[in-house]
Image: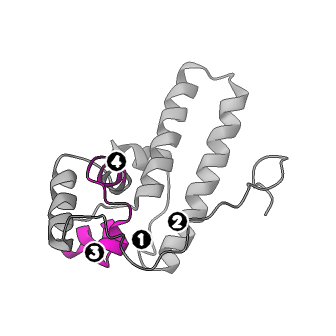
Amino acid sequence: MARMHARKKGRSSSTKPYVTENPKWVTQKPKEIEKLVLELHNEGNTSAMIGLRLRDQYAVPNVKLATGKSVTAILKENDIQSKFPEDMTNLMRKAIDLHSHLKDNPRDLHNLRSVHLTEAKIRRLAKYYKRNGVLPEDWNYSPASAELEIK
């Protein structure tokens, strides 16, 4: 598929190897991994960072294969949920940073275009999450409210 905001062709399609069971060399049991996920979240890590730390420091290559649940499903089971999904939060944080940069540098047209592209991505994600019931139907993105909600 072609790139959305660039004049380039698509990305090379590398995929994870098809594996259906947890490797034999993983020593942790599913309950231990769930406990580690909760501990890492209490330290302030996002779900992506939790997965990276489990992979790199605790030798758990795939949480879903080891426990049968994803990191976000484990957090949701324990009533730990953020207001917005992580990908949307990251995009909103990027848009806030770009807006603050543009306040200091109003003639920076390259970053102005970047703000427009980022906000378009946020709106597309919001449409998707509203359709799937993750966000309320009356929620709309605005830079001012995003700054209050995210930071």
Whole-Å distance between the Cαs marked 4 and 2? 32 Å
Q: Quadrant of residue 66?
A: bottom left
Q: Quadrant of residue 136?
A: bottom left
Q: Which of the labelled discs sits on residue 126, or is there none?
A: 2
Disc number for residue 56: 4
- Residue neighbourhood size for the residue with mark 2, other residues' Cα within 10 Å, grouped as few (<14), some (14–19), many (≥20): many
What's the amino acid at mark 2?
Ala
Under circle 3, the secondary element is: helix
Question: Who comes first in sequence, dot 2 or dot 1?
Answer: 2
Mark 4 or 3 closer to N-term? 4
Provide the residue span drawn in magenta: 52-77
- The amino acid pointed to by label 3 is Thr
Marks 3 and 1, how far apart in space? 27 Å
Using the image, determine if residue 91 lies above or below residue 66. above
Q: From mark 4 to mark 3, how far is it between C-alphas?
A: 17 Å
**What is the quadrant of residue 120 in the picture?**
bottom right
Q: CA distance from mark 4 to mark 1?
A: 32 Å
Figure check: 41 above or below 147:
below
Q: Amino acid at mark 4?
A: Asp
Is 35 placed above or below 89 here? below
* Residue 41 position in % (x across, y down): 21, 54
Q: Residues within 10 Å of mark 4 (few under 14, many from 20)?
A: few
Q: Which mark is residue 67?
A: 3
Which residue has dot 1 on it? 135
**Observer able to see residue 56:** yes
Residue situated in front as seen by the camera: 117 or 39: 39
Question: Is residue 68 shown in magenta?
Answer: yes
Query: Would you say 130 lies left or right of 81 here?
Result: right
